[in-house]
Amino acid sequence: MFTQYKYWKPYISPFDPCPPIRVKSFSTPPQLYINFQQPGLPQYPTPREALKSGTLWPQLFSPYPNPQKGGMKHE
C-alpha cells in the first residue's frame, strides 16, 4: 500500500527572520501509482457517492485535506 501524503524536514537557517516550518508536506494523487486502468475496477454503488468523491472508482479517490480541520498539519 502507498501513502498519498509525503513529509520532509527542511533545512532551517539560524539567520532566517521568519518562524520556521519544521515539517512540510505534500500530496501525491493515486493516479501516480496506477499504471493503467484495469477493466472491471470496483465502482461506487450510487451516482451520489461517486459525485461526492469526484470519481467513479474508489481506488482513484484522493481527499483534499482541510487545514482548519487538522488535515496535513505542519509542525
Image (tube, rainbow, N blue to C red):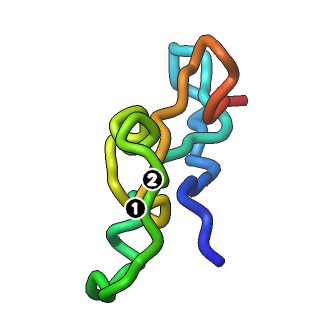
Residue name at image x 34 percent, y 36 percent: 51
Q: Residue at x 34, y 55 (%)?
A: 56
Query: What is the three-letter code of the residue carrying label 2?
Result: Phe
Q: Which residue is under mark 2?
A: 61
* Quadrant assignment, res 1: bottom right
Residue 63 % position (x, y): 49, 40
Amino acid marked by disc 1 = Trp
**Is residue 11 depicted above or below 19 in this figure?**
below
State left or right for residue 69 relative to residue 37. Answer: right
Say whether residue 72 is left or right of residue 56.
Answer: right
Q: Tell me if residue 49 comes above or below residue 37 in the rendering.
A: above
Tell me the residue that label 1 is attached to.
57
Q: Is 10 placed left or right of 49 in the picture?
A: right
23, 19: nearer the viewer? 23
Instruction: Find numbered disc 1 in the image and state the secondary structure of the residue it sits on.
Output: loop
Vertical order, 65 against 50 (above or below): above
On the image, the x and y values in percent for residue 48 come to: 40, 34
In the picture, measured across the screen, residue 54 lies left or right of residue 10, that is left
Residues at badges 2 and 1 in contact (C-beta under 8 Å)?
yes
Local packing at callout 2 (Cα closer than 10 Å; few below 14, some 14-19, many 20+) is: some
Q: Is residue 34 visible?
A: yes
> Rounded to the nearest whole Å, what is the CA distance between mark 2 and mark 1?
7 Å
Q: Residue 59: x percent and y percent?
A: 48, 66
Q: From this viewpoint, is residue 28 visible? A: no
In front of the other: 75 or 63: 63
